[in-house]
Structures are given as structure tokens and as C-alpha cells.
């Protein structure tokens, strides 16, 4: 009996008089979708559109028997697609594609260019004589009315439809970068474009070669205004007058010692005075120059001063005979002095456009510079050593590692301790304070507010605020290096963990 059942199933499968069951043909599915679309359009429109007329208008041809929707059965309700999925998306000009026009396409030119490309790939162009090649070029220009390299192969009747106003491509995210560059991430922090605070600085001397502003580690700002020196406590906001010079004398430079309340002041008489600002009294007067002292720099207990005659003097403030050494460093006035953070090197800049690097006075041949640079085109006043690389020096006008043309006079330079950036003060034409990214030296932002050139810059002890002193007799505080509170918390956590490890080791 089993073999009879098998033969019966085999006969049923091989019969050709019944309808073959299988997936619905593609043309039938297309007809069903067109029929459903026509039904939906007839319900939503006041005009009656049959499936035949819709198909004819869409294709521009009389529908054949195979695409005739009336001869096919209407799909059941369960198999119909929703109108929202069938209705095409609307675009500004009624189409979502840009199809070239075959009527205006130059097929002869296309064929000619294809043959020309094939000859170049096969190497036949090298065997053609220059005369024949020139003839082919002239024939192409005469036949096609110009240079064939500038003629399009495909031709379009109308321009591509323009997107509507305010349209944003949702697929743009697919082609964007997955990782943001470090420079873009760093520049996304908020930098206030207006000064956080403005202080009056009457009678500040508009002299490029002087250094009249310095900010101590105890958060006290010293400013030289004419013959007076004023102290501003940034924490409490109190202002005190330290002293006043004689009528014929004025302050040329001020510099705080690294640790302590001692302030050094250079005058026009060639003297360098030391003041104890905690007791508001003068401790001593040190000579050594016969002209004004326009620059000062501390290296522990060693105070270095530079004068208008180009002389550099090292003073040991602990000794009665304070003069240690004297160097004839520059041909003109010394307007910039900076010791490196490790105290090994001294950078001096002068009005003779020279920049010298001197070894510490404890080293050999300290009377001769170990490096000299003559690339500057103006007086070298702006000097700043990198806080995280002791051998990197930034100077106004140029540098060994990189140089950037600021298009204006560079009056002062500072390094940021919170970010790898440099801030510079400038003169004409914008009188701006500019922040630069290091080492790429790309501009981060400009801080504009002064109406005259920026003469001096100073950094707050916490490294978040920069003070700029301008010839417009104003002091402006810019909070441009504030730390992210999340990063600050992470760094404090790391420091606390490190301190715990040290204690456990001990």
C-alpha cells in the first residue's frame, strides 16, 4: 500500500493542468501596488483616476496585457500595503532623482572620447607623431566647437532641484568624522570675549621697553604708575600705595621674588630697590647701573637687572656686597629678562633685535652667551619659558621651533599652565590679546577691548586669569584659562591617590 501512495503523490506533482503554486511574480506585485495606489488617490482626490489611466500617464505608453490591472484579482485586505509606505516622498521640484536627457546627449562625442582614452591606455598615443596629434586636436575643436576636455558627456535639461530653505541632510552624519581632532576639542571650551574686570591705571607710562606689571604667588598685583607703585590684592580687592619716588624719577620695572613678600623695583636713576610689602618698608637700595633699569628677573636669591646701556648685572641679595658679575650683553637697551624655571638658563632680549641665552652664573664662561639669535626684526621684549619643557623658549618675533607672523607688534608673552597654549599681547591695529595653540601655533581666539596697545601681561597664581595692561590706562582681567570642574576633580583625585601611596611607602 505504501508504494501505491507514493505513486499517487508523484502523479499529483507531475500534473501540468493545474496552477503552479509559488511566489507571486514581480510584475503582478507591481500591478497590485499600482492598483492600491490608484484606489487611494481616487478616495483622496475629487477627480476619478482609474488604474489604467494612472499607469498610462506614469509610463507614457499603452499598458500591455501583462500590466493590465483589471485582468488580475485585487489583493486581499491583509496583503495591501498602507498608503504611507506606497506614496512617494515629496521634493521641492516634484522629483527625487536627476535623470540625464538622452535627446540632448552627444553620443558621437562620447564615443570619440572613449576611443581616445582606450588609445592612451594601450600606449598608441606615444607612437603618434606630433603633427598627427596636432591635427587630431584641431579636428576635435572644429567639429565640436571648442576644447573637448571641457565638454560634458551627459546633458541635463534643467538644473538640479534646490533643497528648501532650512533643509538639513539627515545622512550627513554618516559621512562625518567619527573622532573629533584634538585641536577642535580643545577650542570648544568657553572663553569669555569680554574682560571679567577693568581697573583704572592712570599715568601708566606708554613705553614699550619697560616692565611695569607683575603678579605674585600670594595673589597680589604690583603696578608701576609714573613715580608710584600700587599693590592690588586680587583676593580682597584692596588697593594700597607702596611708595612714591621723587618728581624727576619714575618706576621702570617691578618683579616679585618667587616666594615671599619681597618686591624689586627698578628706577631711572639706575638703582634697584627691595621692598618688604608685608611691612610696607624699603629694605635696601642696590646700585650697579648708570642708566634706567627697565627689566628685572629673579632666580632664587639672585636678582638680575638690565639697563638702557645694554648691561646685565647679577645681584646676590643676601650679601652686603651684592654685585656678583656684570655683563655687557647688548648694544642697546635690555628690555626683556627671563630665567628658566629650573634656574639653569637666562634669556635676554634687547633693542638691538638680539636674543641671547646665558648659562647660570655658577657655570663656566657665564660672561659669554651659549646661544644668540638674530632673526628678530624688532626689539625683543616678550620672553617666556615653557612651564612643562624647560628648554623651550617663546620670544616675540620668532622662535627656533616655530614662527608665526602676528601682523602686529608683540609686546608680551605668557604660557598657560592649565592648557598647552600661549597668550600674546599686541599693538596696532587691533590692540588685542591673542591665544595660540601650541605647538601648531593656530589661533584659538582674540580678546579685544583695549583702545591702545597692550604693553604688559601677567598671570594669576592659579593660572586661570590673565591681566593685560594697556596704554589706554586700563588693566583688564580675562578669565580665559579656567579649568573644567570634572578634569579638575580627576586631577585632585590622582594627586590624593599619589599622596596616599607615598604615605604607605613611608
Image (cartoon, grey):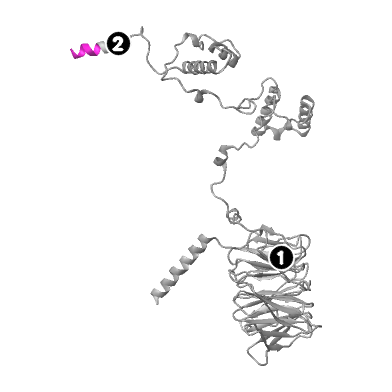
Quarter assignment of residue 243: bottom right
Quarter assignment of residue 239: bottom right
**Residue 214 % position (x, y):** 67, 74
Frontmost residue, 473 versus 456:
473
Q: Number of labelled discs?
A: 2
Frontmost residue, 173 versus 40:
40
**Residue 64 % position (x, y):** 54, 9
- The answer to whether residue 361 of the structure is visible from this angle is no
Crowd around label 1: few <14 · some 14–19 · many ≥20 (10 Å): many
**Direction bottom: furthest residue:** 320
Res 12 label = 2
Residue 4's place in the image compared with 481, above or below, is above
**Direction top: furthest residue:** 17
- The answer to whether residue 193 of the structure is visible from this angle is yes
Residue 32 relative to residue 342: left or right: left
Q: Which residues are magenta?
A: 1-7
Which secondary structure class fits the magenta region best? Answer: helix
**Residue 109 % position (x, y):** 71, 25
Q: Nearer the viewer, mark 1 or mark 2?
A: 1
Quadrant in which the C terminus is drawn: bottom left
Find numbered disc 2 in the image and state the secondary structure of the residue it sits on: helix
Residue beneath disc 1: 425
Residue 144's place in the image compared with 313, above or below, is above
Residue 187 relative to residue 446: left or right: left
Amino acid at each position: 500500500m505504501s508504494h501505491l501512495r507514493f505513486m499517487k503523490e508523484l502523479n499529483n506533482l507531475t500534473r501540468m493542468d493545474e496552477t503552479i503554486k509559488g511566489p507571486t511574480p514581480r510584475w503582478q506585485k507591481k500591478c497590485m501596488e499600482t492598483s492600491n495606489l490608484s484606489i487611494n488617490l481616487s478616495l483622496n482626490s475629487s477627480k476619478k483616476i482609474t488604474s489604467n489611466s494612472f499607469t498610462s500617464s506614469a509610463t507614457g505608453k499603452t499598458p500591455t496585457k501583462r500590466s493590465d490591472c483589471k485582468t488580475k484579482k485585487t489583493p486581499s485586505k491583509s496583503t495591501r500595503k498602507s498608503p504611507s509606505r506606497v506614496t512617494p516622498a515629496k521634493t521641492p521640484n516634484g522629483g527625487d532623482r536627476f535623470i540625464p536627457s538622452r535627446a540632448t546627449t552627444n553620443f558621437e562625442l562620447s564615443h570619440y572620447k572613449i576611443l581616445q582614452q582606450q588609445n592612451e591606455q594601450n600606449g598608441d598615443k606615444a607612437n603618434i607623431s606630433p603633427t598627427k596629434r596636432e591635427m587630431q586636436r584641431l579636428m576635435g575643436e572644429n567639429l565640436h566647437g571648442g576644447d573637448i576636455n571641457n565638454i560634458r558627456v551627459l546633458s541635463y535639461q534643467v538644473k538640479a532641484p534646490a533643497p528648501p530653505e532650512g533643509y538639513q541632510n539627515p545622512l550627513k552624519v554618516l559621512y562625518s568624522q567619527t573622532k573629533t581632532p584634538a585641536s577642535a576639542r580643545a577650542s570648544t571650551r568657553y572663553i569669555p570675549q569680554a574682560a571679567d574686570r577693568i581697573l583704572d591705571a592712570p599715568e601708566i607710562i606708554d613705553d614699550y621697553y619697560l616692565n611695569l606689571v607683575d603678579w605674585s604667588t600670594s595673589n597680589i598685583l604690583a603696578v608701576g604708575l609714573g613715580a608710584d607703585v600700587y599693590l592690588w590684592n586680587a583676593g580682597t580687592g584692596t588697593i594700597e600705595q607702596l611708595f612714591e619716588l621723587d618728581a624727576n624719577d619714575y618706576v621702570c620695572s617691578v618683579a616679585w621674588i618667587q616666594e615671599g613678600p619681597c618686591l624689586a623695583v627698578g628706577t631711572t636713576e639706575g638703582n634697584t630697590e627691595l621692598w618688604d610689602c608685608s611691612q610696607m618698608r624699603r629694605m635696601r637700595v642696590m646700585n650697579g647701573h648708570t642708566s634706567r633699569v627697565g627689566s628685572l628677573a629673579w632666580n632664587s636669591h639672585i636678582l638680575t637687572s638690565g639697563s638702557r646701556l645694554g648691561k646685565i648685572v647679577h645681584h646676590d641679595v643676601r650679601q652686603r656686597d651684592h654685585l656678583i658679575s656684570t655683563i655687557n650683553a647688548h648694544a642697546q637697551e635690555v628690555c626683556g629678562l627671563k630665567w628658566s624655571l629650573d634656574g639653569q638658563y637666562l634669556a635676554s632680549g634687547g633693542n638691538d633685535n638680539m636674543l641671547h641665552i646665558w648659562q647660570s652664573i655658577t657655570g663656566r664662561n657665564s660672561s659669554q652667551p651659549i646661544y644668540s639669535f638674530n632673526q628678530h626684526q624688532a626689539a625683543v621684549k616678550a620672553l617666556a619659558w615653557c612651564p612643562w619643557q624647560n628648554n623651550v623658549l617663546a620670544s616675540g618675533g620668532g622662535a627656533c621651533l616655530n614662527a608665526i607672523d602676528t601682523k602686529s607688534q608683540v609686546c608680551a608673552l605668557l604660557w598657560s599652565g592649565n592648557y598647552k597654549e600661549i597668550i600674546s599681547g599686541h599693538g596696532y591695529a587691533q590692540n588685542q590679546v591673542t591665544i595660540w595653540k601650541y605647538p601648531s601655533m593656530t589661533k584659538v581666539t582674540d580678546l579685544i577691548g583695549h583702545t591702545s596697545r597692550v604693553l604688559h601681561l601677567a598671570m594669576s597664581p592659579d593660572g586661570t586669569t590673565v591681566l593685560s595692561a594697556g596704554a589706554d590706562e586700563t588693566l583688564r582681567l580675562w578669565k580665559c584659562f579656567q579649568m573644567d570642574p570634572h578634569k579638575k576633580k580627576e586631577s585632585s583625585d590622582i594627586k590624593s591617590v599619589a599622596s596616599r601611596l607615598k604615605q604607605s611607602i613611608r
